[in-house]
Image: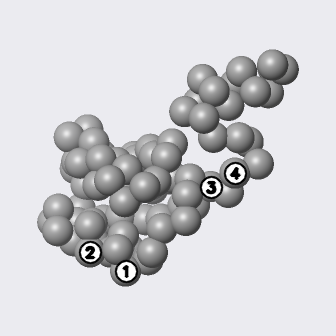
Amino acid sequence: MGLKDLFAAHAGGESSEAPQHIINVSGMHCNACEKRVCLALEELGATGVSADHETGVVTYHGELDEDAIGNAVSSLGFALA
């Protein structure tokens, strides 16, 4: 196993070649908000999800349906920006 494979395994199994998607979510105010958004996207099948409430930027790996993302985010009281 090479260094690149070790890094990918440590980073949640995603290879550095896996496409990263970036969305903007408005309405997040704290770390708890970030966690709720991350968990919702993970339930849809996303991996490597991270959210930043200060910038509203959410990143993830995986192919998710845009409508499903919008529904999940809005069900939490947030909105896609």
| Residue 14 appears anywhere in the view | yes
Question: Residue 20 — which label?
Answer: 3
Mark carried by residue 67: 1
Q: Residue 46, percent across and down? A: 46, 53
Check contact, mark 3 vs mark 4: CB within 8 A. Answer: yes
Give the Cα distance between marks 2 and 4.
24 Å
Q: Where the N terminus falls, by quadrant?
A: top right
Whichever of labels 3 and 1 marks the residue nearer the N terminus, that label is 3
Residue that label 2 marks: 71
Q: Residue visible at 84% across and 20% down?
A: 2
Q: What's the residue at 71%, 21% (across, down)?
A: 6
N-terminal-most mark, 3 or 2: 3
Q: Earlier in the sequence, mark 4 or mark 1?
A: 4
Mark 4: amino acid? Ala
Callout 2: helix, strand or loop?
helix
The amino acid type, in three-letter code, at marker 2 is: Asn
Which residue is label 4 attached to? 18
Query: Which amino acid lies under the numbered mark 3 shown in the image of this protein?
Result: Gln
| Label 4–label 1 contact, CB within 8 A | no
How many residues crowd around disc 4 within 10 Å: few (fewer than 14), some, or many (20 or more)? Answer: few
The reply to whether discs 3 and 1 touch (Cβ–Cβ < 8 Å) is no
Q: Is residue 55 something one can see in this rendering?
A: no
Element type where label 4 sits in the image: loop
Disc 3 from disc 2: Cα separation: 20 Å
